[in-house]
Amino acid sequence: MVIVGGGVGGLGLATRLCETLGRAGLAQVVLVDRWPTHFWKPLLHEAASGQLDPATHQLQYAVQAQRHGFEFEQGELTALDRAQRHITLSALRDADGREILPARQIAFDTLVLAMGSVTQYFGIPGAAGHALPLESVAHAEAFRRKLLDACLRASHARRARTAQADTPVSINIIGAGATGVELAAALRDTVRLLNRYSPFSLDPVRDFRIRLIESGGRVLPALSETISARAQRMLDSLGVEVLSTTRVTEVRADAVLTEGGAPLASDIAIWTAGIAGPPVLRTLDGIAVNRNAQVSVDRTLQCTNDANVFGLGDCAACPADTAGAFLAPRAQVAHQQALFLARALKCRVAGKALPEFVYRDAGTLVGFGREGAIGSLSSSLLTRPVFVDGWFATAVYKLIYRRHVMTLTGFARMALDTASHWLRRRVHPVIRLH
């Protein structure tokens, strides 16, 4: 069984399969990923804002493989041969372009595509070149570096009384979904913390302009109006400027252009407005994909035109209960699909009919940094989602990540990891300055 992609779904599936089929000697599990480490994507906004050191939250695939009994191959998927049942990985090269590992072929009986998603710029001129995505730790680090550089530049301009002394640092976040909203709130915390240190001494309100630009009529358009309205009030209290019903028409190095509006000054632009499946999925030997390059799967999560290929998570278009609708690309969807496939693939090995995946929405929580979290919780015991906020929502928000760590490493390692991070935050600065 070959799993391509070590995100929430892929790594969770590899770990669980080895605990069942692997230990029983019924399956050999191989995990493929282009990176050597796993990072929980819902934390990317904290890494980008400098409030979290990603190195302390990354899980090494090779270590996880050794502990649980699967094989790990680092490389990028480039081709699929459905008739011969093998995939091809590109050569792995170092920073100087020298080959570390050659191109490789890996045979499979069952292939699971769990490759996540990439940023979709919708063909907006300049967006890909001037608006950073937020897909990986590398992107988060690039944004954080640009933020620190912009702050240093602005702080020097204030002290030197240059012509730009009164120009605020302008950060434009394009897309007011959960990622964009959480990043905006986290950045407000970051600029407040940066003001403690003389090289970055800027007024957190006067010297920064943080904008959320949303083409829809409200922030968090995928969530309920109750949550959206509460989020808007919290963003207002944080001093985040929200431009709703505003369509971006072009992104430049120093400005964001909108339909019918004046150019918006921009020191940093980041794009959180849409996702699609990785482009390589369109080239995989005729595997069925939709217009967003997501693998078309049925309710067993099998590809609609190849029963030996499965898809899960953001890269898969899985039917929802509503006719013609598909499940949203969310971490909890990938998590539930991984649990389902771990059971379903046992049936496949045993020659039994595959069950159908049923998604159970557990709700949605959105973090606002030191202001806490808001959202809704759902359960089969509840007749409708329940709005939550305050300390309870904040506690549940933090526990979601800890549950993810526990799923992969077990309770003891999760508890030790939690304690180590608690100690680290009391020894080290709460903001990364380099």
Image (tube, helix red, strand yellow):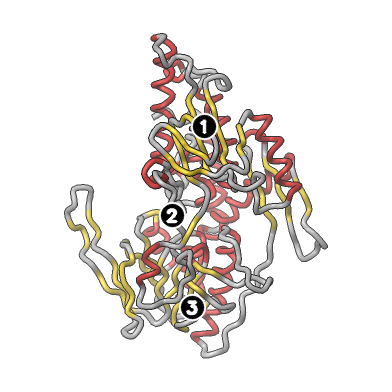
The secondary structure type at the circle numbered 2 is strand
The secondary structure type at the circle numbered 1 is loop
| Marks 2 and 1, how far apart at CA | 41 Å
Question: Of residues 60 and 264, which is closer to you in this image?
Answer: 264
Q: Which mark is residue 38?
A: 2
> Residue at 53% of width from left, 49% of height from top?
273
- Nearer to us of marks 3 and 1 is 1
Location of residue 238 in the rendering, given as x and y in whole percent from the top left corner? 64, 30
Question: From what the image shows, is residue 145 above or below residue 157?
Answer: below
Three-letter code, disc 1? Ala
Q: Residues within 10 Å of mark 2 (few under 14, many from 20)?
A: many
> Residue at 52% of width from left, 88% of height from top?
350
| Marks 3 and 2, how far apart at CA | 25 Å
Who comes first in sequence, dot 2 or dot 1?
2
Residue 34: which quarter of the image? bottom left
Location of residue 254 in the rendering, given as x and y in whole percent from the top left corner? 41, 31
- Report how many numbered discs are placed on residues in the image: 3
Question: From what the image shows, is residue 202 above or below residue 113?
Answer: above
On screen, residue 253 versus residue 257, left or right, reads left
Location of residue 420 in the rendering, given as x and y in whole percent from the top left corner? 51, 41
Who comes first in sequence, dot 3 or dot 1?
1
Three-letter code, disc 3? Cys
Q: Residues within 10 Å of mark 1 (few under 14, many from 20)?
A: few
Q: Which mark is residue 262?
A: 1
Location of residue 401 in the rendering, given as x and y in whole percent from the top left corner? 58, 51
State if disc 1 and disc 3 touch (CB < 8 Å): no
On screen, residue 212 versus residue 433, left or right, reads right
Three-letter code, disc 2? His
> Residue at 68% of width from left, 66% of height from top?
360
Look at mark 3 in the image and give the residue it sits on.
303
The reply to whether residue 261 is in sight is: yes
